[in-house]
Amino acid sequence: MRQIDKVCVKIPAVSPPARLKRRLNLKERLIRGLILIAFFLPGVSGDQAFSAEEPGKKFYFELPLGLEQDYMQIPEDNPLTPEKAELGKLLYFDPRLSKDGTVSCATCHHPAKGFTDQAPVSTGVGGQKGTRSAPAVINAAFMFSQFWDGRARTLEDQAKGPIENPIEMGNTHEGAVNSVKAVKGYAPYFQAAFGSEEVTMDRIAKAIASFERTVLSGNSAWDRHTQLKDASALSESAKRGLSLFEGKARCTQCHVGFTLSDSLFHNLGVGMAAKEPDSGRFKVTGQDKDRGAFKTPGLRDLIKTAPYMHDGSVATLEEVIELYVRGGEANPWLDPKMRPLDLDTQEKRDLLEFLKSLEGDWQPMEPPTLPE
């Protein structure tokens, strides 16, 4: 994983060399095109997406092997700069954004835990328990919406939500702004990032989102196998698992591209047998077809982010595979792509070995020293 600091490497606006560029099949290209049309998200590409004239110097960095710069979602009003990312890292780890000074973004999305909290559901202020598992921040910069139900269209929108959620950080936006203003040590960071010391909720969110866009994972064994044609990168079992992933196991029905996610929403039946099941995407759209549907997560660094599913109800990857072998859990809104799989014991082992090959070559970052 790379969290980008001051020293960066320039990336030209042109496409990466052919030997490093992922050759998407027709299906993946169609899905990505449909996603872009569906969401109409603001974004830029090329050098514009990775640089800013003000304030400070231009900001360039090299993405880990396997990631594609053209798909990074960066709003036009928040170009990515090292100054904003540096400020955002401080704010991300600062519990003073919460009502009682005990919960930060990192509480539920901690680097040492795969940028999750490795718990079925997260714990907020006053020990309150939420109802959903904390999704990983890893490569969130490439997602076309945020949260399990996709209610936030950008990382900026997402950053604002937990602060005023009564179960998570329990604060108000005004309260968070006042808390940051009271920390005099933040003034030079806001000056460097935004050209003045003014603290606003929009600036706090833009800084946190900028930091989160630098939380990247790639250069996995799978990337080295597919991008560099390194025959030794995957074990024979993992190679068989890759064939299953792309074929008989039907995983690429939803887990496509370098993010291994279609950024769409599907009902797997998880949690639908509860007395009051989480209605998921339905809360956002009000469309009956979206009941119990949740966003397809990316599959990189899966080992670090257990337990799995939106409610953290599936403890291991072996159990995840068994869920798909069953064809999900029956309910009136089960996604039609869910159907039983005929996988024997060895095939399940091979598929598991492939999933393990998606681990990036990163080490958890150390929490920063916060301003006084």
Image (cartoon, rainbow, N blue to C red):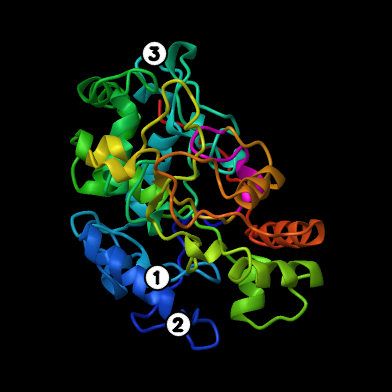
**Residue at the limit of the structure toward the bottom, as seen here:** 18
Residue 100: numbered disc = 3
What residue is drawn where x is 24% and y is 21%?
A: 172
| Dot 2: element | loop
Residue 162 horizontal/vertical position (percent)? 34, 29
At label 1, the amino acid type is Gln
| Dot 3: element | loop
What residue is drawn where x is 74% and y is 67%?
A: 238
Q: In which quarter of the image is the N terminus?
A: bottom right
> Would you say 91 lies left or right of 193 here?
right
| Dot 1: element | helix
Using the image as rendered, state which of residue 136 and residue 121 is in the foreground. 121
Residue 144 falls in which quadrant of the image?
bottom left
Q: Quadrant of the C terminus?
A: top left
- Residue 150 seen: no
Disc 3 crowd rating (10 Å Cα; few below 14, some 14-19, many 20+) is few
Which residue is denoted by mark 1 in the rendering? Answer: 69
Query: Is residue 309 located in the magenta-colored stretch of the structure?
Result: yes
Q: Earlier in the sequence, mark 2 or mark 1?
A: 2
Query: Is residue 114 located in the magenta-colored stretch of the structure?
Result: no
- Residue 127 seen: yes
Boundaries of the magenta span: 301-312
Which residue is denoted by mark 2 in the rendering? Answer: 16
What residue is drawn where x is 33% and y is 80%?
A: 13
Disc 2 crowd rating (10 Å Cα; few below 14, some 14-19, many 20+) is few
- Gap between marks 3 and 2 measured at Cα: 47 Å
Tell whether label 1 touches label 2 (CB within 8 Å): yes
Name above or below for residue 105 compared with residue 264.
above
Using the image as rendered, state which of residue 295 and residue 158 is in the foreground. 295
- Gap between marks 2 and 1 measured at Cα: 9 Å
